[in-house]
Structure formats: C-alpha cells, structure tokens
Image (cartoon, rainbow, N blue to C red):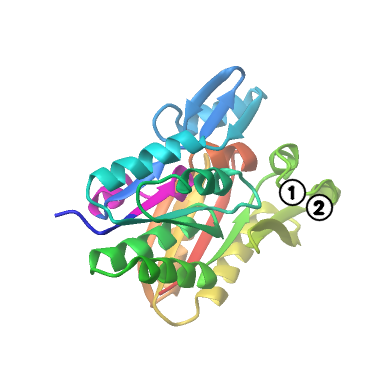
Amino acid sequence: MSRHVAIVTDSTAYLPRQTRERHAITTVPLTVVIGDRALEEGTEISAKALAEALQKKRSVTTSRPSPEVFAEAYREAAEAGARSIVSLHLSAEVSGTYDAAVLAAKDAPVPVRVVDTRMMGMALGFCALAAAQVAEAGGSLDEAVAAAEKRAAGTSAFFYVDTLDYLRRGGRIGAAQALLGSALAVKPLLELDGGRIELREKVRTASKAIARLEEIAVERAGSGAVDIAVHHLSAPERAGVLADRLRERLPGMAELHVSEVGAVIGAHTGPGLLAVVVSPR
C-alpha cells in the first residue's frame, strides 16, 4: 500500500540502504567531479576512490542535482500514489541542492514542501527518518514537515578534520578561519551553526581534539533519549573507538550509526574526518 506522503532527500543524508528501503525514502544523488569525470554519489564513486583522488591531489569538485532530476523523483513518487511530498535537503548555505529542488517543486504533479534542514550527513538523515515515521503512521504533509523541522532544530553536528585546506579550497570555510586553524599546527574542531561550517575550538593535538569531540558530544546529548551517528573518512579505527566510548557513556542512546561519509562531504573535509551527530528524540 502506498503512503500518501512521500519522503525525498539527497545523497548527503548517508542513510544506510536498508534504512532507506525500509522507510521508503527516495534519495537524489549529488555529483562529484574528478578531473573531467562526473560521478554520481552513492552509485558511481566510493569513499575509498574519493580519498585516493584527494591524496593524489587530483582536481575534485562537487555539483548539485539538476532540477530535472528532482522533477523525475517527484513524478515517480506521484505515480506510485503519493498525494504530497516532503523534500528534505542539506544546508543551502553550502550547496545549491535546495534551490534545485525548489525549482522542480513548482511544476510537480502533487504539492511538494522543500525544506532546508541546515544539516548534512546523518544530521539530515535523522530529519528524513523523523518525517518518514510520521508518514508511515498516516500523518499529514504538515505533520511530516513539522517532525523534520523539530528534529533539525534539536540536532547538532561536530567534527574534526586533519586540515582545513579542503574546506578552504571548496569555499566552505573562510580563508581567515583556515589560517587560524593551521597556525601553530593547531587541530580544528568545527560545528554546524546556522547551516554553516564554523570553527568551534582549536586544540593542540589530534588525540586531544578527538577526546574533546567525545566530551562535546556527551555534554550535548545529556541524559535523555538520543540518536548518535559517528562519521569518518578513511579513519575507521578512530570512528570505532569513538563509537565504543559514546556507547559506554550515553545510557540514553537509542540508535548508533557508524559510517564512512560519501564522496560529496568527503571532498570538502578530506581523509581523517571524524564527526559526531547528536540528535535528541
């Protein structure tokens, strides 16, 4: 039986395939361009291939989906029986994906509500799951949008990168912030703030930065029910250790997702990324 409210998101949500299928969430892919090759995230380029390209200092850029790709996703949802669609996307501060979805929504065969979650990674993924769960329970378009927006408002994302160079090259962080991060070999801790990537703290060593990342996540999670995601790029050991520590320290943890980010976010953070998403229920 088809749901009346369909959920669409983009590939930077990094939801596991089984989760997307179980909750009938449609994912529209962003594109990674390596040299002169344009590759769809999630199907045509792996995180490993992206990391290798970055380490070889090849030209890597990213591109939003076209409005036509969104239009096709909306048409298919309508043909499957959806009477309305919630389309949830990564922050418009760092990507034109939201704008492309808005353009496509104008001519969609059913009403489409496009939401700039101001999130990315599983911070976006948790918003999509919240909307999907409301839709599964028979909720309305407005109720699904409200659930996603409430989840976004309460969700935080913090991350460590080995260098700010990739963020600077992609224009995702200012040159002044990048300079501060590289001064005196300081290791940067960043956060999503208002949909933008901001420098939160500067720590002297990588080990201290990762320990501080753990503390920030524990402080933000508090003692209530919370979902956690740990992301990484080419740093599975770091991610595993951090996930184990958070599992021990957060008795209110409901779900824990540990995953490597895809090529789009990886292109702007570089190998060594370690991130924590804290999403209270």
Q: Is residue 264 left or right of residue 185?
A: left
98 vs 182, nearest the viewer: 98
Quick one: SS at disc 1?
loop
Counting every numbered tag in the picture gives 2
Q: Say which residue appears at 73% left-offset and 45% top-offset.
A: 164
Q: Is residue 83 visible?
A: yes
x and y, in percent, of residue 100 in the image: 54, 42
Reading the image, the residue beneath label 1 is: 173
Quick one: SS at disc 2?
helix
> Which residue is at the far top?
36
Q: Is residue 117 left or right of residue 165?
A: left
135 vs 190, nearest the viewer: 135
Indicate which label's residue lies in the foreground, 1 or 2.
Answer: 1
Q: Amino acid at mark 2?
A: Gln
Q: Quadrant of the N terminus?
A: bottom left
Q: Is residue 227 visible?
A: no
x and y, in percent, of residue 169 in the image: 74, 37
x and y, in percent, of residue 210 in the image: 61, 58
x and y, in percent, of residue 107 in the image: 44, 44
Q: Say which residue appears at 42% left-offset and 61% top-offset.
A: 126
Confirm whether the magenta stretch covers residue 79: no
Residue 177 shows which numbered tag?
2
Q: Say which residue appears at 83% left-offset and 46% top-offset.
A: 175
Q: Quadrant of the C terminus?
A: bottom left
Q: Is residue 21 left or right of residue 270?
A: left
Q: Amino acid at mark 1?
A: Ile
Mark 1–mark 2 Cα distance, whole angstroms, equals 7 Å
232 vs 2, nearest the viewer: 2
- Marks 2 and 1: in contact by CB < 8 Å? yes
Q: Say which residue appears at 60% left-offset and 70% top-offset.
A: 216
Q: Which residues are magenta?
A: 7-22
44 vs 140, nearest the viewer: 140
